[in-house]
Image: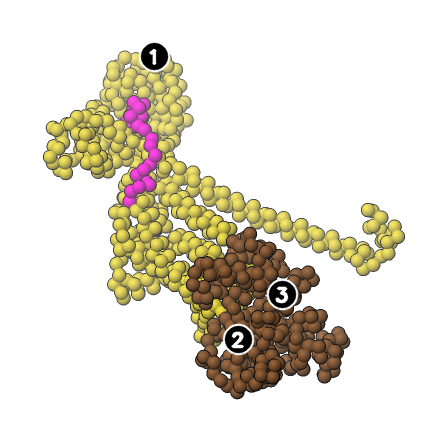
Amino acid sequence: MNIMTEAGVEQKLSSGTNAPSIKMKGEKVSVHYGEKRALFDVDIDVRENQVTALIGPSGCGKSTFLRCLNRMNDTIDIARVSGKITLDGEDVYDPKIDVVELRARVGMVFQKPNPFPKSIYENVAYGPRIHGLARSKAELDGIVESSLKKAGLFNEVKDRLLESGTGLSGGQQQRLCIARAIAVSPEVILMDEPCSALDPIATARVEELIDELRQNYTIVIVTHSMQQAARVSQRTAMFHLGYLVEEGATDKMFTNPDDKRTQDYITGRFG
Amino acid sequence: MTDAISPLGAVGRPVSIHTDDAAKARLKGRYRTETWFKWLGAAAVALAGLFLVLLLSTIVTQAIPALRQNYLTLPIDLSAAKVDPAKLGEVNYDAIAQEALTAKFPDVTSRQDKRLLRGLISTGTGVFLRKDIAADPGMLGGTVDYAVPLDDFADLYLKGLLADVGSDEAISTSVTPSETSGDIDLTFGDDAMLALARGHGATEGENGMLTLTSGASSLLVAFNGGTVKLTALSPAANGTVIAKGTVIEALDSTAPAASGQAFLRVIETPEASRKISDKVIVWLDTLKSAGLIESRFNSIFFFTGASREPELAGVWGAVVGSFLTMIVTLAIAFPIGVSAAIYLEEFAPKNRLTTMIEVNINNLAAVPSIVFGLLGLAVFLNFFGMPRSAPVVGGMVLALMTLPIIIIASRASLRAVPPSIREAALGIGASKVQTVFHHVLPLAMPGIMTGTILGMAHALGETAPLLMIGMVAFIVDIPGGFTDPATILPVQIFMWADFPEAGFQQKTSAAILILLLFLVIMNAIAVILRKRFERRW
């Protein structure tokens, strides 16, 4: 299945030098919405088992880039993506790539918690079921339980798994959505401002969760909160007006950015 | 409060653009407009409610008489002499029932009167009798009391719908007849009858003679076990009155009836302007006072097919026809409509072609229904040679008419499903089809079903397109299948409304009531579905 491309070789090389290998890679990614160009030649590496934060003012293209990674932009008729995005060296926009398989490997958590109006159990079990990941009911139960545990929700909902997922609080709903994404065993989880609709306490729980999830998954998170980016991410990419301003280790970005725009944005002078 | 209105804006309140007099006037004007609007709205609702009540009460009051039918109990001779048990199919049951009836009135001798008398019972009597005997052969071998439905005019008269009949009043003078039958003279003890006759439209002649023509109310005098219809009155000596009359029912004797022994019955509606003669009225009253007539729940109306005889006509054939037609409509329009809506809303690319299709679907919803009937006639009947008057063709035509309604309603409810649900499903790797069928469609279903039921209700009440494909034919049999000739409720109503017989008037209203009932039930189901499956997200 794995086609050895140049990127794949690169990945092997970089993993040899003890640095985290590159899980996903964007090369000259551009997106047009009809006539309007939203993203200009973005190059980003997403490293395995790290959290990559995408920051920047509203409308800068960070969500657009995120949605390119699992081809969610396909659902928008007028969106057109050019450039190359690879997952483990395979081009995700290659016609040979099945988008359903891609999305099973690259899961997504959205800005607004969007559980299905079904039971908590069904919400989590849906993904494994359609992908045929469980051979028996017991196995499915196991996946649901472990996913809810990983999402830190199990103890709160274990007695009401058959109640509607929409009846949970906002923070619980968002963790349910994370559990739902985890249940498919993705390799990468994309999070589009996952805490923007949550209160500080729920946000703290989700941030803790992200940090734990990093052990097993590669995470890309879009956020408007500088503190959140600083707290949860290892690498940060700054976007502005559709351009990638700079990308680097979070520590460096927040203490000593190369670009003045990054400095201004982080310190709250514009944006 | 009065302080606040003063131009200085007193009590320490500074005057600003929101507190000065002009502002107060503006505010007042705003409230006035609001009040006006509220009242106009309330008036509009009240007016609509009034019309609804008016409509319903008219239909209901008209329909109520049709819910009951009068039956006459006759001793029917089913002995072996009349009915050969080996040849049940060859017996003239109508004749047997008519004999039983004429036996009740031995003085009716003329051919014309006998025919009139036989007409009191429904022409369907023989059919009912044959059916009941087949079901219960134990009736044979003797005389049984059997209730036969009355003819429509007799029935309507008994329901008080044909003639305005006053109650019996005792005559406070003596009445002396000259004969017991035929045209006779009656002598009244005083002249009270003259004033009465004048009051009821008698024509004045010479010598104070009053003639009661067929244009005047009928005055019937009942005494000595018989009934006499007055035709003319003239004053005589000693303040008495001599009246000419025709005996309708023979008197027992020529003995004078004492004061209070004779009864006057006035039928206000002149004989010329009603469809039932005095003779028939007298016969019916006699049968009724003998306790032989009974009003029953009109099962004929509810459980039989169409008929030319009002008392035999029922809606069941039309109800079954409507039901079969609706099944075909639903079976065609629902899957096609919902599939089209799903494709257009979820899968179709947004280009010039799909936009054109959309516009045309919306246009189709506005096409007059008779055009669909013409289409059905040209395509289904003439081109494909499908059977005329059949529910399958009617259902197809109505399905074409309902399709755009279902598509539009389904698309609206699919669009109402939040995109976040689609993203959620796509985000965990569900395919497009899985997303639509596992998540979007179930959430849109209540809306789709509501739209479908309303579309079906619309189709159920449709008449015009079905006239074009021959469903207006007069069909007596209850349709047994989709290709049998049938008619449907609204068309049946249309046909009955057209029939001249007075008995159909009530049937029409009753059938409208049944149709309304179906529509109310369907709309109620739509409301319940909407409430029951409404989801929050």
Which of labels 1 and 2 is toward the front? 2
Residue tagged 3 = A209
Say which residue appears at 47% left-offset and 61% top-offset. A140
Q: Amino acid at mark 2?
A: Arg
Residue bounds of the magenta highlight: B283-305
Q: Are marks 1 and 2 on the same chain?
A: no
Specify the chain shown as brown.
A
SS for callout 2: loop
The vertical placement of A169 against A259, above or below, is above
* Quadrant of the drawing holding the C terminus of chain B: bottom right
The mark closer to the camera, 1 or 3, is 3
Residue B389 shows up from this direction:
no
Q: Amino acid at mark 3?
A: Leu
Marker disc for residue B258:
1
Residue B322 in the image: state x and y as whole percent.
34, 51
Direction from residue B358 to residue B294 in the image, left or right: left
State yes or no: residue B287 in magenta.
Answer: yes
Task: Estimate the x, y position of residue B463 in percent, counting from the top left.
Answer: 37, 54
Instruction: Say which colour chain B has.
Output: yellow
